[in-house]
Amino acid sequence: MKIASFNANSIRARLPIIVDWLAAQGPDVLCVQETKVQDPDFPQQTFQDQGYHCAFFGQKSYNGVAILTQRPPTAVVSGLQDNRQDEQARFLSVEIDGLTVVNTYIPQGQDPDAEQFQYKLTWFERLKAYFESNCDPGKPLLWVGDFNVAPEPIDVYDPDKLAGSVGYHPAERKALQAVMDWGFIDVYRRHNPQEQMYTFWDYRIPNAVKRGLGWRIDHICATQTLAERSTNAWIDVAPRLLPRPSDHTFIVAEFDF
């Protein structure tokens, strides 16, 4: 089974890139973040024409998550189910043949002194509570998406310069680790322990991809029983070099499942 994740930064703007990538790679599951589209306007027919079923949870202009699957999904859950009045379109879960796939778009945080940063830390706490209440770390479970956190120094292009920045701040790295400690393994790192490869390059930095000025903030994590069945994990940089790209690219993991 091939699982992929991609922050599209507008699924409609990036539709040609996604369609071509699906045709070339044929993943069983593609999780998409920052779809930036209300549910009635989601380009469902385009993906159905490629043989994919679509589950999606969106809002106008911001956020939004979707899961495209070759087999029909079941047990679709939108949102963290904790009765918060400020629920945003950041969480989507489905089941496929006994595998639970959770797709998240973690808040960016803006600035360590901003209210949005505390919202980000709280969101991680809410996510952990969801896993504790609804999931079993002993069963096959994937948690994927744009986490907006680079976990380790190897995951950013300049850890000294970027220390304390949003995306590589000690508080959010700690918050991410708390969720990982529930029972997740970083599948990309399992297969690439020393590789310095990124999934995000800021539009504002000229030639950031070619200069290697990136961050690994998009992740595919699995419970141990599933991680042990992973056979490969990789990042496809090529789509980030296409015309009108997202500022992210695809991360992929393969499983004997």
Image (spheres, rainbow, N blue to C red):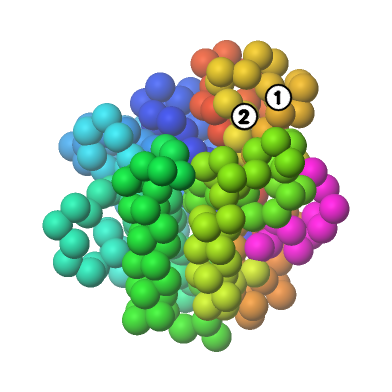
Give left or right: position of 48 versus 16: left
- Count of numbered marks: 2
Check if mark 2's residue and mark 1's residue have beta carbons within 8 Å: yes
Seen at 37% across and 75% down, the residue is 129
229 vs 81, nearest the viewer: 81
In this view, the residue farthest toward the front is: 113
Seen at 27% across and 30% down, the residue is 61
Q: Give the range drawn in magenta.
A: 186-196
Query: Which residue is the site of mark 2?
Result: 201
Secondary-structure class at tag 1: helix
Is residue 189 located in the magenta-colored stretch of the structure? yes
- Tell me the CA gap for discs 2 and 1: 6 Å
Q: Quick check: can you spot residue 153? A: yes
**Local crowd at mark 1 within 10 Å, few (<14), some, or many (≥20)?**
many
Seen at 82% across and 58% down, the residue is 193
| Kind of residue at badge 1 | Val
Residue 76 occupies quadrant: bottom left
Query: Which residue is the site of mark 1?
Result: 209
**Residue 240 rendering spot, x and y as whole percentages:** 62, 26
**Residue 99 rendering spot, x and y as whole percentages:** 49, 71
**Local crowd at mark 2 within 10 Å, few (<14), some, or many (≥20)?**
many
Q: In which quarter of the image is the N terminus?
A: bottom right
**Residue 145 rendering spot, x and y as whole percentages:** 50, 51
246 vs 14, nearest the viewer: 246
In this view, the residue farthest toward the left is: 85
Q: In which quarter of the image is the C terminus?
A: bottom right
